[in-house]
Image (tube, rainbow, N blue to C red):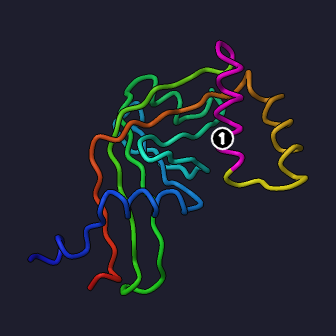
């Protein structure tokens, strides 16, 4: 068995890992073909990544031109505990100006992962007020690459 096969995560391990990470690196393609990278809070439901951002952001402009995306979640400090998942996929954009209720619903899903208690209501109220200026991105992964060095 190759080292690559040894460190590869199962579908279940990928899902658990992605549901427990805090941030997701987002890679889109700029107009000139160069990569545009940013970090987002997100929710992973086992089949799709969900995040939201301002509609005028560079990543939304890029995704309107080219719906392809690469995302990365990683963890670990030393080589022996490095873990990560890269997903390649295609995106759907839901614009808050046109679909405010749907954008709010997804913003609540993402927010529930990060904001708890009294802060939650305040955060969600702020997001509701911003919803016409925000868009939700749904990432449908087509390929995963994973590694878990704790397996070696």
- From this viewpoint, which residue is outermost toward the left? 1
Circle 1 Cα neighbour tier, 10 Å, few/some/many (<14 / 14–19 / ≥20)? some
Front residue of 58 and 131:
131
Left/right placement of residue 143 relative to residue 106 reads left
The residue most toward the front is 12
Residue at the image point whose x is 39% and y is 45% from the top: 35
Residue lying at 62% horizontally and 37% vertically, measured from the top left: 52
Q: Residue at x 43, y 86 (%)?
A: 78
Residue 127 image offset from top left, x and y in percent: 78, 35
Q: Is residue 98 magenta?
A: yes
Residue 150 position in % (x across, y down): 35, 83
Query: How many numbered badges does the structure rendering display?
Result: 1
**According to the image, label 1 marks what residue?**
109
What element does badge 1 sit on? helix
Range of magenta residues: 97-112
Can you say whether 102 is above or below 41 in the image? above
Q: Quadrant of the image for the N terminus?
A: bottom left
Residue 85 lies left or right of residue 19; in this view the side is: left
Residue 128: within the magenta?
no
Q: Nearer the viewer, residue 136 or 14?
A: 14
Quadrant of the snapshot with the C terminus:
bottom left
Where does the image place residue 36, in percent across and percent down from the top left? 46, 44
Q: Quadrant of residue 142?
A: top left
Residue at x 71%, y 20% (from the top left corner) = 101
Identify the main secondary structure in magenta: helix
């Amino acid at each position: 068995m190759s080292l690559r096969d040894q460190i590869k995560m199962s579908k279940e391990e990928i899902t658990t890992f992605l549901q427990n990470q805090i941030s997701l690196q987002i890679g889109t393609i700029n107009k000139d073909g160069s990569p545009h990278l940013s970090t987002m809070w997100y929710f992973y439901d086992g089949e799709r990544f969900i995040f939201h951002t301002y509609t005028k952001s560079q990543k939304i402009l890029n995704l309107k031109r080219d719906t392809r995306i690469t995302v990365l979640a990683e963890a670990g400090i030393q080589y022996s505990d490095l873990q990560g998942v890269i997903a390649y996929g295609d995106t759907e954009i839901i614009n808050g100006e046109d679909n405010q209720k749907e954008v709010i619903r997804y913003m609540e899903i993402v927010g529930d992962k990060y904001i708890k208690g009294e802060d939650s209501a305040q955060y969600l109220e702020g997001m509701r007020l911003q919803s016409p200026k925000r868009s939700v991105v749904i990432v449908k992964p087509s390929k995963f690459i994973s590694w878990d060095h704790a397996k070696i």
